[in-house]
Image (cartoon, rainbow, N blue to C red):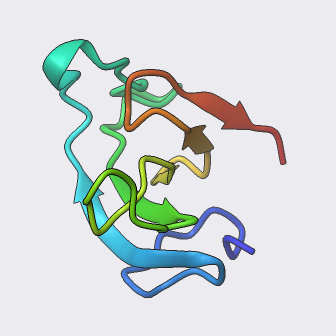
Amino acid sequence: MLNGGNQSKTKIPGTKEGGKIFKNDGREGGQTLPKKDSKGNTIEYREYDINPAPQHGSTRGSERMVVGSDGKTYYTRDHYKTFTEFKH
């Protein structure tokens, strides 16, 4: 589904928004993901909406998938407060 961890700016099936840069800055007390890979390279993340049904007047839901340039993929159900890593 994620093409071997390669990041894409295009829509992933089952998602709404596709490939916007995820800043990974922990704003509003949210969890941050690793900033460097095992070789010390900076990891860039892209975010994708999952199940983008409107909630409470919003046009986007709170679920996201975040894909790192290191090939790791994370899921958040609570709009970046917590993450669960997908194991490939």
Residue farthest along the top direction in this orientation: 29
Q: Position of residue 45 (x, y in %)?
A: 36, 50
Residue 58 occupies quadrant? bottom left
Q: Nearer the viewer, residue 9 or 31?
A: 31
Residue 32 occupies quadrant? top left
Count of marks placed on residues: 0
Q: Is residue 62 left or right of residue 13?
A: left
* Residue at 26 percent of width and 34 percent of height: 24
Quadrant of image for the N terminus: bottom right
Q: Is residue 45 left or right of residue 50?
A: left
* Residue at 39 percent of width and 65 percent of height: 54
* Residue at 46 percent of width and 32 percent of height: 78
Q: Position of residue 65 (x, y in %)?
A: 53, 53
Q: Position of residue 14 (x, y in %)?
A: 65, 78
Compared with residue 24, is residue 44 higher up or lower down, i.e. above or below?
below
Q: Position of residue 35 (x, y in %)?
A: 33, 27
Residue farthest along the front direction in this orientation: 56
Q: Nearer the viewer, residue 37 or 34?
A: 34
Compared with residue 14, is residue 79 higher up or lower down, i.e. above or below?
above
Compared with residue 28, is residue 14 higher up or lower down, i.e. above or below?
below
Q: Is residue 35 left or right of residue 87?
A: left
* Residue at 30 percent of width and 19 percent of height: 30
